[in-house]
Image (spheres, rainbow, N blue to C red):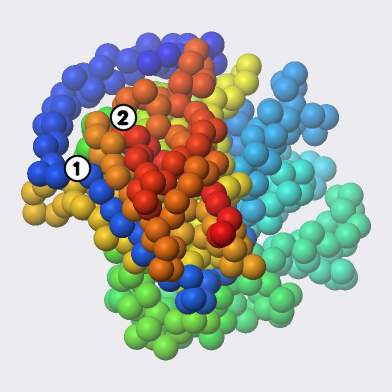
Amino acid sequence: MQTTSAMPRLLAIVIPTLLGIHAGIATAAPVEPAEKPHATLNIDTSAPSKAVSPMLFGGFIEHFQDQIYGGLYEPGSTLADARGFRKDVIAAMKELKLSVVRWPGGCFVSGYHWKDGVGKVRKPVPDPVWGATDPNTFGTDEFVEWCRLVGCEPYICTNAGNGTPEEMKQWVEYCNATEGEYARQRIANGHEQPFKVKYWSIGNENYGPWEIGRKDADEWGPLVDQCAKLMHEADPDIKLVAAATKKEEWSLPLLAAAGKHLDYVALHEYWFGYQSKNMMPPYKDCIMRSEGPEKTIETMLGILDKAGCRGRVRIAFDEWNLRGWHHPGFPRKKALEAGDAEAVEFIAKREINKIHAQYTVADALFSASFFNSCLRHCDDVGMTNIAPIVNTRGPLFVHPNGVVKRTTFHTIAMYANLLESRVGKCAVEAGQFGGGKNPIAVIDAVVTVDESGKKWSIALVNRHPDQTADCTVKLGEHLLDGTFAATVLAGASPEAFNDVEHPGRVAPEQTKLTFTKGTATLPPHSLTIVRFTQP
Ligand code: AHR
């Protein structure tokens, strides 16, 4: 573990705790498969391919810890532009071809009032959710400007906690109207042209007892219906998402009451719940969660089918990550005095999110499988947003002197830059891994193809920690043969990670992959993207 000069005493407080946690985790027993890891990919070249949504590799950013202030926004930093946006963060986001970003929360939004965050005079307010004081210097105008600099779609999540439907409508007007009180306000704030914010969410996790203004399932649908009507009055062209879950008892009544207005239902999932107790499980424990995302998608599709909305309403996986954020003592539901002793202590504990050793090759490969699952269902999954995109548990760690690209950064960059725009039909037969009652496939694969049907790009994950895997690819009737350009992300060990002193320990390598009579060998604990043109 390393620290930066920005987190001096806090880490000194938490380090002993962390070491205790780390030492308390048993190392996973070595895996002894009965056979060499292998898989066969049968690609059906005559089947129609499916288009991938351009928003499949998006991000989420919340007013939490230093995701915004001291993350992407740091006025006064020599690394920031004149408006305070960190230029190195913007460059990294461009490298990810970031397509969409959800803001301002998360739980934070259920206590957030957008009017505090616009205009010349900004009012700092106590944040009742995370116990901090929000200076409100980063609000709607700054968020939209930042998205324009990055080149991504802004996606605003509204306050369905202690906010009102009228407040949501006015927010849409502020962003998108050409006339009226809120359009005039935006113009007075220096933005003559409407922001044209296309993606809006009604609420965040309003089913949860942790959320300010939690709702019952029978209240939620009618409320979403009311909010959607008002928001569409302000701008009929916006795309609407509503807070949902994979639980029928919440999502079926929502879809029955308001499904006609919705373009997406939101899903959130963190496959380790570390909100109150952090842990650092070994590679195998992490990798064994890799098939969870697909199960969640399939469950949600069952609900969309049952509601008769499938095909019209898609899934926005608008918060996801392997590890839940660590924030013991939070969320709260009441504003605290700045400096409240208990809050200060709890806020210090969030520094645990900064331990670089937590973000290993396991996170990179889990994320690859997350994307593979979404790609396999790309007609139904229209958006995903890693939570968060910057700091806390995100792919980019920002410190006062620069950034560190964590292992997941490279996964996202590879998927966003190296895959083709459509998903091809492919049956994967893979050996199993993990033993026990619930083994998983040792190789996970997804096949993409361009519009012409000739250029292919295949993402292959070898989940085995220490064995190479044989992967056979059959393209129509032919076994793939030849040597092709490939990019491989593996690192020296399954537990490898990047930090400030070693930012390039886990990084993609450009190489070649040779298929002989259809079969190529994949390195242990690796993600490979191989590209070729059909002969
Ligand atoms: O742990 C962070 C929180 O996770 C987000 O604010 C919330 O939306 C989700 O429960």
Where the C terminus falls, by quadrant? Answer: bottom right
- Residue 398 in the image, given as x and y percentages of width and height: 57, 27
Q: Is residue 155 visible?
A: yes
Residue at x 32%, y 25% (from the top left corner): 493
Residue at x 28%, y 53% (from the top left corner): 39
142 and 91: which is toward the camera: 91
Residue at x 77%, y 64% (from the top left corner): 196
Given the image, on which type of amino acid does mark 1 rest? Lys
Vertical side of 497 occupied by 257: above or below: below
The number of callouts visible is 2
Instruction: State the CA–CA distance, disc 2 to disc 1.
Output: 18 Å
> Which mark, by number, is residue 494?
2
Where the N terminus falls, by quadrant? Answer: top left
As drawn, is 183 to the left or to the right of 337?
Answer: right
As drawn, is 176 to the left or to the right of 218?
Answer: right
- Residue 235 in the image, given as x and y percentages of width and height: 73, 75
Q: Is residue 225 visible?
A: no
As drawn, is 70 to the left or to the right of 118?
Answer: left
Residue at x 35%, y 35% (from the top left corner): 523
Given the image, on which type of amino acid does mark 2 rest? Pro
Vertical side of 381 occupied by 443: above or below: above
- Name the residue that disc number 1 marks: 36
Residues packed near mark 1 inside 10 Å, few (<14), some (14 to 19) or many (20 plus):
some
516 and 497: which is toward the camera: 516
Under 8 Å from ligand 1: the CB of mark 1?
no
As drawn, is 443 to the left or to the right of 169?
Answer: left
Vertical side of 355 occupied by 129: above or below: below
Secondary structure of the residue carrying numbered label 1: loop
Secondary structure of the residue carrying numbered label 2: loop
- Residue 7 in the image, given as x and y percentages of width and height: 49, 16
